[in-house]
Amino acid sequence: MDSAAAEPPRETGTWLIVAMVAGAVALLTLLGSSGFVFVISAFLTTLFLLYLIRHVAFGVSAGLWGRSTLDSPADLSFQPPISVIVACKNEELVVDTLVDRLLDLEYPDDRLQVVIVDDNSDDRTGEILDARAAEEPRLRILHRPPGSTGGKSGALNDAWDLCTGEILVIFDADHEPDPDTLLRIVRHFEDDQTGAVMGRCVIKNRDDSLISRLVWLEYLSGYLCDEFGRQAVYGLPAYGGANCAVRVSALNYVGGYNEHSVTEDTDLTLRLLLAGYRIRFDPTALDYEEAVPTLAQYRKQRYRWSFGHHQCWRDYGRAVTRANTLSPLEKVETLMFLWLYHVPVASFMSLMLIPLLLLGLGASLGSWVLVLFPLFLLGPFLQIGSSLLMTKDASPKHVWLMFLLIPVVIAYVFTCSRSWYNGVRSKPYTWVKTARKGP
């Protein structure tokens, strides 16, 4: 493995907030209160419209071509040597089921290696893995010592040193892939330009709670509309953190997993695209995972995703605008992808404008913010509807479930805004492990 590690995150510090406040004061002084509200409203209106158009485009593409993609036959004859890696940290509740599912995967034994990392667990994870490995020669267990750093990225990098495959396939400890998932994922690497492939993750515990049902809807939209739409419209799906694969030579070229990032998947997506590789999404490569069942866990998980996504914008936003590996249209979509978690921050700004608009300041355009904010919410609803139709799972109860997403979205707005604020202040992220339910 090359030693060319990814760079530490770009720090901004409080100077960015000071600069924003100074800019706002200067704009307010120059334009007056009504002019200031007008300019901010124009920015928010344009932003919401652009993302609404994006949502509609993805929803339409899923509606037109999604079902045929799910039903189309697949050539599964391409079977290069691969290594499956799973990083585990205190996963005693799910690791036995994980091993069972990995051993059930359909792939030639002489081309399949399975490496499971016990990342210095303080429960029975390591003990369970050692017992299973003693019975199954296909399993290789790596125990990271105390003091090991880098989190999941560090564990994957350490495991990579032991791997013999041309392709690395990554799962999380709570995941249960379908038997043919490996065959469906790796077939896309027959194209030398493919650097990574993402499969589709499905929520397996949607009936545990209201939150898990809402997460199930989110995942439907995220994979069957967002990922499918990015691939259908732009050819730019993202690499995810699990049920995904990366070409070893591509990973080596970009310097491995970034141990400074809390969202190593988004970080790797950007580095692969900037290096000229392409990412593919296969909605037929299915894998089942647990959804968080409570609002508190949901907010913690989404805080991490948002924090990492904002970090990737600061780290790679400039590089995307200068990249010679992306067309102008692809640059626009990649920047919009990086700005996904900034839109909730903009939504928070629009909510702050409401008192000013009620006072008549900037009302000529500002009132459109109040119209377009709910329209922006309709975009994800359209994506969810298209996804339900694709899976033939649409029913009246799901319509009511979509409306219950609204208060969750409002909580999401505040969560993303807090993560953005902490990110620009260079406040370090404290890792919070997602609790598992188990079988």
Image (cartoon, rainbow, N blue to C red):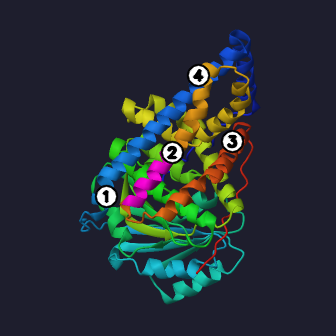
Single out the mark in the foreground, 3 or 4. 4
Residue highlighted by disc 2: 378
Amino acid bearing label 1: His
Q: Who's the residue at 63% across and 41% down the image?
A: 9
- Spatial separation of the CA atoms under disc 3 and disc 4: 24 Å
Task: Give the extent of the magenta segment.
Answer: 378-389
Of pointers 2 and 4, the one earlier in the residue sequence = 4
Nearest the eye: 390 or 22: 390
Q: CA distance from mark 2 to mark 3?
A: 21 Å
Query: For the residue marked with disc 4, what is the amino acid?
Result: Leu
**Which residue is label 4 attached to?**
365
Could you tell which of marks 2 and 3 lies nearer the N-terminus?
2
Between discs 3 and 4, the one toward the N terminus: 4
For the residues marked 4 and 1, what is the alpha-carbon distance in whole angstroms?
48 Å
Q: Position of residue 242 (x, y in %)?
A: 50, 62
Q: Which residue is mark 1?
A: 188
